[in-house]
Image (cartoon, rainbow, N blue to C red):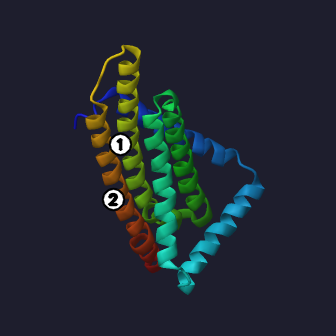
């Protein structure tokens, strides 16, 4: 597990945890109107599960589209090494969204919310691991490109970019699997639990 022991990966993980803390703080201090809207939206979602009015194909497509577009931003920022400093900010934002979502579910459904959060957020955890790995490779690419540009060195960009593209394609394959889990498995388990 060479990647996990890398300083860049550890830094990204710390930034994600920092984002989670910010998400918790923002949930604690959000207004009662916001919490009221969260409650209504969560209960509406559970109501949709009960009535089986979910369009699974559209839901899966939207889930994959959102996840893949976020990954595409990270991928492009890795190529544009001047803007790679934005990648850690995206990871912090994902941490905020994750913890805010978990605390929202627990807030709405109390003790049952812990179980609901585990079921609903499992695909998100998979996605977050994928985002962290893609971010690691993106920042590594940016550093290599910057060093080559700074030192006027010729590097075999074609080979390195080809590897980077393969990583991105594998990333999207796993995102597709995660979207399938989110759409078909997590929602049906939640339907069974509710």
Residue 64: x and y in percent read: 46, 62
Residue 158: x and y in percent read: 29, 36
Report the number of numbered marks. Answer: 2
Where's the N terminus, which quadrant? top left
Check disc 1: other Cα within 10 Å, few if <14, some if 14-19, many if 20+. some
As drawn, 158 above or below 122? above
Q: Which mark is residue 133?
A: 1
As drawn, 126 above or below 49? above
Secondary element at image label 1: helix
Residue 16: x and y in percent read: 47, 39
Residue at position x 44%, y 80% in the image: 192
Residue at position x 23%, y 34% in the image: 2
Looking at the image, do the residues carrying marks 2 and 1 touch, with CB atoms under 8 Å apart? Answer: no
The residue closer to the viewer here, 76 or 34, is 76
Residue 152: x and y in percent read: 36, 15
Q: Residue furthest left?
A: 1
Residue at position x 64%, y 48% in the image: 27
Check disc 2: other Cα within 10 Å, few if <14, some if 14-19, many if 20+. few
Q: Residue furthest bottom?
A: 51
């Amino acid at each position: 597990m060479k990647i996990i022991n890398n300083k860049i990966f550890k830094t990204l993980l710390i930034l994600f945890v920092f984002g989670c803390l910010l998400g918790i703080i923002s949930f604690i201090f959000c207004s009662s109107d916001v919490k009221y809207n969260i409650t209504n939206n969560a209960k509406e979602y559970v109501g949709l599960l009960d009535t089986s009015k979910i369009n699974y194909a559209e839901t899966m497509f939207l889930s994959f589209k959102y996840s893949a577009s976020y990954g595409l931003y990270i991928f492009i920022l890795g190529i544009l090494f001047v803007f790679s400093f934005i990648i850690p900010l995206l990871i912090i934002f994902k941490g905020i969204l994750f913890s805010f979502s978990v605390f929202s579910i627990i807030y709405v459904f109390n003790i049952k919310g812990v179980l609901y959060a585990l079921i609903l957020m499992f695909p998100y955890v998979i996605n977050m691991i994928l985002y962290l790995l893609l971010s690691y490779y993106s920042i590594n690419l940016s550093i290599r490109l910057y060093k080559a540009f700074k030192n006027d060195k010729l590097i075999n960009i074609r080979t390195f970019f080809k590897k980077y593209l393969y990583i991105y394609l594998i990333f999207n394959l796993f995102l597709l699997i995660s979207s399938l889990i989110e759409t078909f498995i997590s929602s049906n388990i939640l339907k069974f639990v509710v």
